[in-house]
Image (cartoon, coloured by chain):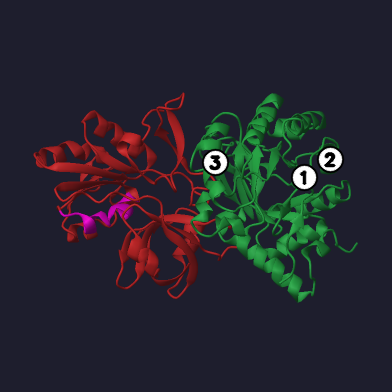
Amino acid sequence: MAELSVNLGKFTMKNPVTTGSGTYGYGQEYHQLYDIAKLGAVTVKGIRMTPSHGNPTPRVAEVTGGMLNAIGLQGPGVDKFLNDEHYMPFLRTTNATVIVNIWGTTIEEYGEVAARLDAEKEGITALEINISCPNVKAGGAAFGTNIELASQVIRKVRNSTTLPLITKLSPNVTSIADFARAAEAEGSDCVSLINTLSAMAIDIETRRPKLANVMGGFSGPAVKPVAIKMVYDTYRAVKIPIIGMGGICNADDAIEFMLAGATAVAVGTANFVDPYAPLKVIDGINAYLDRHNIADVNEIIGQVRI
Amino acid sequence: MKAVIISNSRLQGDYFEVVFTAPEIAEKAVAGQFVHIRIDERNDYILRRPFSIHSTDPEKGTVSVAYKVVGKGTLAMSKLASGYEFDVMGPLGIGFSTPADDVVPVAVAGGYGSAALYLLSRVSRQKGVLLAGARSKNDVILTDRYEKAGFDVRVATDDGSMGTKGVVTSLIPQVLEDCKGKKLLFYGCGPHPMLMALGKLLKEKGLDGELSIDHKMCCGVGACFACVIKVNDPGSADGWRYARSCSEGPVFPLDDVYLGE
């Protein structure tokens, strides 16, 4: 059994595996199947100040090698998240390391939700700033694809909380490394990447888009090589730790991300295929390390041989 | 969990029935619940497919799913032979309630919605009624099984090729006439427009029921929020909220279903 704990700057994870925000609900659904505290961290679905309906249906479409989604950040709002038994009060009953993904439609709202969570932070280990959801008009992509706006959001959140901050980056930009540098400069403690790729699919019989929102975010095994390259680029651009994600289905995929420079990884779409995927990834990383006589998982981070 | 196909055969036309071993599911399942199946014959398509549970044999530990070939996933499924092993999750979702001893269940099915209502016949003390609606006689399936279970089966088809010509809800007034004095509970499963029409008619007539409503699913356990449908929510500014059909449904009490646009 190798050492699996990793250091994300201001917090540690008992192993390098978390979940992609939006693919794991608020943890409760999967806690019925296994103890979610076994994961390095549980990253919950995005939270803003007020409740949100999200987008109309259909919200998902299957495509070759993955899927498109345009859920549109349906959520309970921060008050319900902090007080309703299905959300934070439930998570506090587990020993899970909890990362709360946050978003807003204005820079001020990002600050407000961060401050609100900071005021009741028992059980919250870190915040992940979502500036990269491609499926909501205001918030999300509008902030994540403009460096100046992204910087302002991160600055606002940084000034609103002492919790460790992870900035989730959009792949829908010319140079993701530039955004990682901006996040680092504004005091983000980590970056996570990639969010979904902006995409679209059309039903040729009806000639209508397969998603009610017309466009959505592409995820699943097909995006992995894109994500690996972006993690590789980012690793060379910043000193803060990277949480890598994008198409991770098994331990081999996770190890590839770590070799490219990720300190931790997130399992996303694979949760929909196999609810036990994150646990299998943890076991598989351990087996790989044993097979290669590596005592500590940190020894493989960024160790791709160029 | 792993399941093994016992048989996979054509019912009629594009409709098939697959029977597989899954003892835990066979023991627990109730009408309206579903299984979430992963067929990894095609690695380029990764998502699971949800199917209503048609029937179970708890003693043999088998589960039956009746399905229509509509796309890549179901086409691949229709070609699987007995002995094929696959991964299945279930029983998932909230199913139909068991009718009280004095209640006559009226199953209202659109198309292959009849597949999901069949287990009601096992838990009902009263002889029930099946109203089966379909485009044409080729799409009326499984009615013989309901008849064997003692149900009063009535059919409506859009083209009049079987039963009454018209929509399935047009059969309801006669049922009300014939069942005067009896306690009825309506159980609906079928296409969305049919369920909305059924819901509105039941409300109009002051009748009670449960509707199985879903939308394109992904995770099947309530995590991804893909399969939402509108339910009444007095606390929301719009009077409704999106509920996950996989985990909060697919069966919803009629009073919960939002019947507006």
Q: Return the disc, 2 or 1, that comes first in the chain's sequence.
A: 2
The answer as to whether the residues below labels 2 and 1 share one chain is yes
Rendered red, the chain in question is B
Rendered green, the chain in question is A
In magenta segment, residue B117:
yes
Q: Which mark is residue A225?
A: none
Residue wearing tag 3: A59
Q: Is residue A58 left or right of residue A47?
A: left
Q: Which mark is residue A184?
A: 2
Prevalent SS, magenta region:
helix
Q: Which mark is residue A191?
A: 1
Chain name for mark 2 = A
Could you tell me if residue B153 is visible in this image? no
Q: Return the disc, 2 or 3, that comes first in the chain's sequence.
A: 3
Asked whether disc 2 touches disc 1, contact meaning CB atoms under 8 Å apart, the reply is yes
Chain name for mark 1 = A
Residue A295 position within the rendered picture, expressed as x and y whole percent measured from the top left: 79, 70
C-alpha separation, residue under disc 3 versus residue under disc 1: 27 Å
In magenta segment, residue B79:
no
Q: Who's the residue at 58% across and 35% down the image?
A: A213
